[in-house]
Image (tube, rainbow, N blue to C red):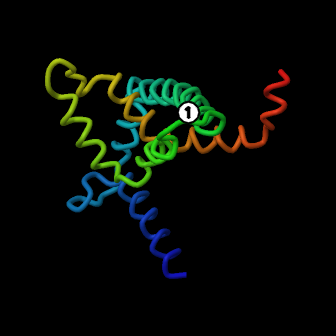
Amino acid sequence: LIISIIVILLYGAIFVGAFTKVWGVDYSFSLENLKNAMGSRGALKNSLTFAVVAAICNSFLGVIIAYILLRKKFFGRGFMDFISVILFVIPGTIVGVGYITVFNVPPLVLTGTPLLIVLSMIFRNMPLGVRAGKAALRQISPSIEEAS
């Protein structure tokens, strides 16, 4: 019950903050934040485009990695399975700082580019794609696959 109340208060604060002029300073009612959020169509279009591209790539890569992990026998398979889910364990902030640190020096200066945003979305959500692919492939018998 206490956790539910805390969550409701948190979402309530976010809702109230969306309709204030300056959070923490001026709590007077304003629709300026809503107007700014809905007025920038470019940001919404970019977000949706990046999400669709990342979802397609993640689905494709997730099924391929899941197939390799389930159907092929090779040395290091357990390590590959571990690597495929490690990004769930590492906090997103740490991963983000790592991306900026690695890709902010030549020869690959990708900081601030759409490619880095899509790549970070793909690798951040890779465990979901791999686990979903493994769950789907476990339902298909290897004998059916061989028969086809």
Residue placed furthest toward the front: 75
Q: Quadrant of residue 61?
A: top right
Q: Is residue 115 left or right of residue 105?
A: right
Q: Is residue 49 left or right of residue 144?
A: left
- Residue displayed at 54% across by 35% down: 74
Locate residue 60, reporting x and y percent: 58, 26
Quadrant (top left, top right, bottom left, bottom right) of the N terminus: bottom right
- Residue displayed at 57% across by 38% down: 129
Q: Is residue 103 left or right of residue 54?
A: left
Q: Is residue 148 left or right of residue 90?
A: right
Locate residue 117, reporting x and y percent: 35, 30
Total marks drawn? 1
Locate residue 28, reporting x and y percent: 30, 58
Residue 119, placed above or below residue 37:
above
Which of these two is toward me, 15 or 2? Answer: 2
Name the residue tied to disc 1: 65
Residue 110, placed above or below residue 96:
above
Quadrant (top left, top right, bottom left, bottom right) of the C terminus: top right
